[in-house]
Image (cartoon, rainbow, N blue to C red):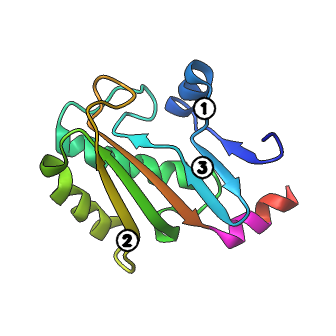
Amino acid sequence: MSNLQYYSYPGAGDWGRETMHYSQAVRVGDVIHLSGQGGWDPSTVEVKPNLLEEVDQAFENVDYALKYAGGKGWSQVYRVTTYCTDIQAVHNRIVENFRRWMPNHEPTWTTIGVAKLGLDTMHIEVEVQAYDQEGAAAAKKE
């Protein structure tokens, strides 16, 4: 739908758009929908070699993608879906990141165990939806 606003941040976002023909985020009304964010370095697309650091980086990438799309970050997130190759190994770290990034609210959350993700080196992908009424109004003025 070409009438929607799509966003791909520099580095990994540009790589995804050019290599795989997808965007990191799209605005639909007052909602920002993110594609799954992995634990990759946003500049190089290299996935963190340590599993817990990979989880932390995925959460940082969500924040980056939301802000790149004009949002305020995790404070606006109301829905989270995590895709994990080993749910038990990352579950507690995900909860720690929820408490770190969203200390004032608890989003809805679904976690799904998968055999494989988009890159062979990935073990987690975090997909969110964020309510951004102010940003949507500002984006319409552009």
Q: Nearer the viewer, residue 133 or 113?
A: 113
Residue 107, image x, y percentages: 40, 71
Please tell me in which quadrant of the rendered image residue 58 appears: top left
Q: Nearer the viewer, mark 1 or mark 3?
A: 1
Looking at the image, which residue is at 28% across and 61% down? 97
Looking at the image, which residue is at 60% across and 32% down? 22
Q: Which amino acid does label 2 sit on?
A: Met
Magenta residues span 132-137
Q: Which of 89 and 7 is in front in this view?
A: 89
Horizontal arrangement in the rendering, residue 15 relative to residue 120 (left or right): right
Q: Compared with residue 21, is residue 6 higher up or lower down, i.e. above or below?
A: below
Look at the numbered disc 1 and give the secondary structure of its residue: loop
Label 3 neighbourhood size at 10 Å, few (<14), some (14-19), many (20+)?
Answer: some
Q: Can you identify the residue that label 2 sits on?
A: 102
How much space separates mark 2 and mark 1, taking CA atoms? Answer: 27 Å
Look at the numbered disc 3 and give the secondary structure of its residue: helix
Q: Can you identify the residue that label 3 sits on?
A: 68
Looking at the image, which residue is at 29% across and 30% down? 116
Residue 35, image x, y percentages: 52, 44
Q: Can you identify the residue that label 1 sits on?
A: 22
Label 2 neighbourhood size at 10 Å, few (<14), some (14-19), many (20+)?
Answer: some
Q: Compared with residue 23, is residue 14 higher up or lower down, i.e. above or below?
A: above
* Badge number at residue 34: none
Tell me if I can see residue 72 in this picture: no
Label 1 neighbourhood size at 10 Å, few (<14), some (14-19), many (20+)?
Answer: some
Q: Which of 100 and 115 is in front in this view?
A: 115
Look at the numbered disc 2 and give the secondary structure of its residue: loop
